Image (cartoon, rainbow, N blue to C red):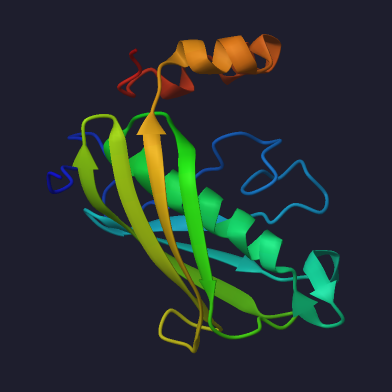
């Protein structure tokens, strides 16, 4: 496995990342009960993502649903890879370890980093903390993402919605 090399045009430290797609459940603004994750680049290899757990996100009374926390990690880890490496990726494996319940009405800070690259495989990890980037550790996650070409999304997705994204990702390394 090679150490990660951020793309030369990757967002710089302090950059707030836009949602990649308005109708994305994880980061989009157009899904009423979505997570509405917000991410900021911390340095060349780290992105900090936040979201506030609402009543719409609970699994048991007053506590975030575990699957929803996994969804947040999937989005945060994928956004870290996609934005820092400027390559479209899909999730191949996602592991989450739950360390502490996450109460409703708290903000989760997910700090994600690209750990390494092996061909099309990208390894990434993160930790979710309650209330602050250095708050109590609640969730840890590791993912394996695979770079894909645009044909993956054309074959399996909604081509009309893909066309609406237009030139937004023209500078990404989109290939087979």
In the displayed structure, 125 sits above or below 123; it is below
Q: Position of residue 66 (x, y in %)?
A: 68, 68
Q: Number of callouts in the render? A: 0
Report the side of 1 relative to 83 (left or right). Answer: left
Q: Quadrant of the N terminus?
A: top left
Position of 117 relative to 102 (above/below):
above
Q: Determine whether 106 is above or below 122 in the image.
A: below
Q: Residue at x 51, y 16 (%)?
A: 152
Q: For residue 58, what is the image quadrant?
A: bottom right
Using residue 136 as the reference point, say whether residue 24 is left or right of it.
Answer: right
Viewer-side residue, 94 vs 149 = 94
Residue 85 appears in the figure: yes
Lateral position of residue 92 relative to residue 162, left or right: left
Residue at 46% x, 14% y is 150
Q: Quadrant of residue 41?
A: bottom left
The image position of residue 22, as x and y in percent, is: 67, 36
Residue 17 visible from this viewpoint: no
Q: Nearer the viewer, residue 149 or 79?
A: 149
Q: Position of residue 107 (x, y in %)?
A: 62, 76
| Residue 167 location (% of width, % of height) | 47, 16
As drawn, the residue found furthest toward the bottom would be: 136
**Image quarter in which the C terminus is found:** top left
Q: In the displayed image of the protein, which residue is found farthest to the left?
A: 2
Residue visible at 59% across and 10% down in the picture: 155
């Amino acid at each position: 496995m090679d150490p990660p090399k951020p793309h030369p045009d990757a967002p710089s430290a302090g950059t707030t990342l836009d949602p990649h797609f308005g109708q994305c459940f994880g980061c989009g603004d157009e899904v009423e009960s979505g997570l509405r994750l917000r991410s900021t680049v911390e340095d060349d290899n780290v992105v900090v993502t936040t979201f506030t757990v609402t009543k719409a996100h609970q699994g048991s009374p007053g506590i975030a649903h575990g699957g929803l926390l996994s969804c947040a990690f999937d989005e945060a880890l994928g956004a870290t890879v996609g934005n820092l490496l400027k390559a479209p990726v899909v999730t191949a494996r996602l592991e989450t370890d739950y360390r502490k319940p996450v109460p409703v009405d708290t903000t989760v800070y997910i700090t994600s980093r690209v750990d390494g690259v092996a061909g099309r495989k990208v390894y990434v990890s993160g930790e979710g903390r309650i209330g602050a980037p250095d708050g109590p550790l609640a969730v840890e996650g590791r993912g394996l993402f695979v770079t894909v070409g645009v044909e993956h999304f054309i074959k399996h997705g909604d081509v009309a919605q893909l066309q609406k994204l237009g030139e937004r990702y023209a500078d990404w390394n989109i290939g087979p």
